Image: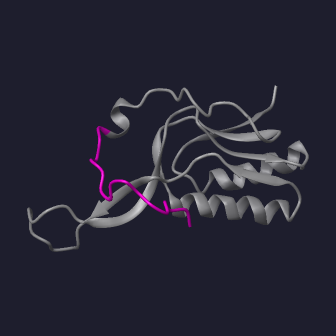
Amino acid sequence: MLIPRKVKHRKWHRSAGMRNSKVASRTTSVSFGQFGLKATTASWISSRQIESSRRAIMRFIRRGGKVWIRIFPDKPVTTKGLAVPMGKGKGAVDHYVANVRPGTMLFEIDGVDEETAREAFRLAGHKLPVKTKFVSRQ
């Protein structure tokens, strides 16, 4: 799974979340491959969900083509144990998430035909908590 090797701050503030999320300004176009999977809604995507999507794509294309993952889970999410009283500090880091805004390119693929790429991204989209759409290089 994807996790940062080294971090400057182990625990982050929780932030305002997706309430104030705006449309993405970076990583919005197909840059590396021929086809891409773009997010149309905002959400946190965990490293497990990214890996699950990647495996679904790789299983479908079977050694054909190359896949790029355009997002990285660098935001730590903390949790406290069950039945732990309020107070006593912040919980331990549980997992990492990628903060995804609408318009962010999630995956790219090259070396396969459009029909194969479309089906691979459809399977990958089912594993993600965001609505997605298939895009191709202009």
Q: Is residue 62 left or right of residue 126?
A: right
Q: Nearer the viewer, residue 3 or 129?
A: 3
The image shows residue 36 at horizontal and vertical percentages of 73, 40
Residue at image coords 14%, 62%: 89
Q: Relative to 122, is 41 above or below?
A: above
Image check: 11 left or right of 68?
Answer: left
Q: Position of residue 73 (x, y in %)?
A: 50, 53
Q: Position of residue 19 (x, y in %)?
A: 34, 34
Image coordinates for residue 37, horizontal then vertical, percent:
69, 42
Residue 65 included in the magenta stretch of the image: no
Q: Residue at x 23, y 65 (%)?
A: 91
Q: Main secondary structure of the magenta part?
A: loop
Image quarter hosting the N terminus: bottom right
Q: Image quadrant of residue 59? A: bottom right
Count of labels in the image: 0
In the image, residue 77 above or below residue 85: above
Q: Quadrant of the C terminus?
A: top right
**69 left or right of 93 in image:** right
**Which residue is found at the position 76% from the left and 53% from the top?**
67
Check if residue 4 falls in the magenta segment.
yes
Q: Quadrant of residue 28?
A: top right
Q: How is the image coloured?
A: one colour
Q: Quadrant of residue 127?
A: bottom right
Residue 51 vs 44, above or below: the answer is below
Magenta region: 1-16
Near-viewer residue (85 or 129): 85
The residue drawn where x is 67% and y is 54% is 124
